[in-house]
Amino acid sequence: YFAAIEALVRRIEEIPGDLSPQLKSQLQLLQDKLFLNAMTACVRGLEPRKHRVVFRLCGSLAFKFRSIRTSMLNAMVFSSSIISELYSSMAKAGIFSKSAAHGEWGDDLRERLTLFCICYNHLLLIQDDAEFFDEQKPCSLKQITEVVRVLKRLLQQLYWEGGRGGGKVLDSRNLSVPWAQLRDVATDLFCQLRVRQSRKQFCERDIWIMPKISFPVFKNELESKNSGRAARILRRIPFVLTFQQRVELFYGFIRSDRKHMDSAGVNFQHGAGVGIRVRRDRVLTDGFESLTKIGQNIKGRVQVQFINSHGIPETGIDGGGLFKEFVTELLRSAFDPQLGLFCQTPHEFTYPNPTSFANPNFGEQHLAYFQFVGMVVGKCLYDGIILEPQFANFFLRKLLGYRNFVDDLSSLDPEVYKNLLYLKKNSASGLGLTFSVARDTFGDSKVVDLVPNGSNIAVTDENRLRFIYEMADFKLNREIAPQSKAFVAGLNSVIKPDWLRMFEAEELDRLLSR
């Protein structure tokens, strides 16, 4: 059997990158569940030196041919034990032992780890949190913790120690798996596992921190022309720095921006800057009319004078306290669910009202108000003003530029999330579901199709996974896309996106309310 696999590997590796229809059809036969199970199971009976041939075949099938990559990965990940076999094989090779922390990464080990990362990444796109945390298949949480340790050691070497004069530079010449390819797939898996950790802790908090990164050196490199490795870490895996270190970087970026804006003519001095007049009973609308006209001066000093209910200016000089009072009242008014611009989850977390377009209070200006509120939230971050309302987790992820998936639905509507997980495990027969959803728009109920002609497409056992994805995508992404885009545009007019992406959703919540 092993000889047959060895011959098959040679034949496949000789095939050119572009597949003819006949070759494509023949290769798709290899997606057979019985074949894949037998092939991966045979690893257990082989001596370790022969494992490589089996995994080379899986690797060739998984990423040599782009046109069948997804279907082949589906077959391997969901119809065979390849992930658990790869883990066992790497464990026997000593990759998870402490003594291997600084060992050589041979060709064989790199191939196995690359294939493991690709397959596990693919699985995590589909696997829900209940399967990951409770069922713990194909790997236990203890095993996943060991994977995190290995990925951290590897990425520390690839991003930092070998990044610029900090250690051995890894050579990719004459390697079957280039370091850049392993770095990219390992980074993807490292980040996906970090997302799971952010929803529910499965390993110690400091396991993600790279101890060999000297923070003073890191900061100096960011401020210099030679910021390559530090900038790459902030862009790809910022959470390997502690939260406090990233907060320090965040406010450092703001201080640098203040200096730049000051040289451009924006006034930050007490008693100076832009002056605005705000009626006490119209804080939101007056704030909107005044602040949307001042452009980048929003970053500087804004002097507020309140007008009382009798139309008389209140006495007092704004030394900063009046502006803080102004934005606090403005945001309290904007986030009030009764106003209809934002609404709340069952646990009273704030997010944009998806039907704000029909709100008579704002009409066609509803998106302009979202952009304005986003700008004010950015100003609060810029000036260190604490926000009272707490945003829903899925909306915080939108502010960071992430797309939400099924498990994020628990932060919007736990009941809908629970029902979708039930549907994933049980038959859709008799439920009467279609690819549509009813939406209430200020008392007017309307059916919205999740896909074209969705109200006429029944949900069946065969298409229920797609229904789950489409429902979650609609609720978390598409339904509030215009409002989120406008809010983010306002936020990013004050706070650069790269500064925010140093943080995760829960950390951004801490930053807003610290």
Image: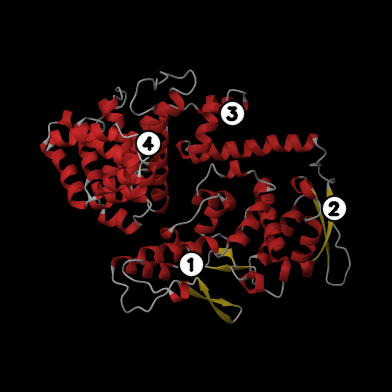
Q: Which residue occupies 34% across, 24% down? A: 175
Say which residue label 4 marks: 17
Mark earlier in primary sequence (4, 3): 4
Vertical arrangement, residue 161 with respect to residue 426, above or below? above
Mark earlier in primary sequence (2, 4): 4
Question: Which mark is in front, 1 or 3?
Answer: 1
Q: Residues within 10 Å of mark 3 (few under 14, many from 20)?
A: some
Q: Amino acid at mark 2?
A: Gly
What's the CA distance linking mark 4 and mark 3?
Answer: 41 Å
What's the CA distance linking mark 1 and mark 3?
Answer: 46 Å
Q: Which residue occupies 30% across, 27% down? A: 101
What's the CA distance linking mark 2 and mark 1?
Answer: 50 Å
| Residue at disc 2, secondary structure | strand
- Contact between labelled residues 3 and 4, with CB atoms less than 8 Å apart: no
Residue 279: where, in percent of width, then height? 82, 66
| Residue at disc 1, secondary structure | loop
Say which residue label 3 marks: 222
Q: Which mark is residue 275?
A: 2
| Residue at disc 3, secondary structure | helix
Residue 33: where, in percent of width, then height? 21, 52
Extreme-right residue of the structure: 312
Mark earlier in primary sequence (2, 1): 2
Say which residue label 1 marks: 451
Mark earlier in primary sequence (2, 3): 3
Q: Amino acid at mark 1?
A: Val
Q: Name the one closer to the observer, 452 or 40.
A: 452
- Contact between labelled residues 4 and 2, with CB atoms less than 8 Å apart: no
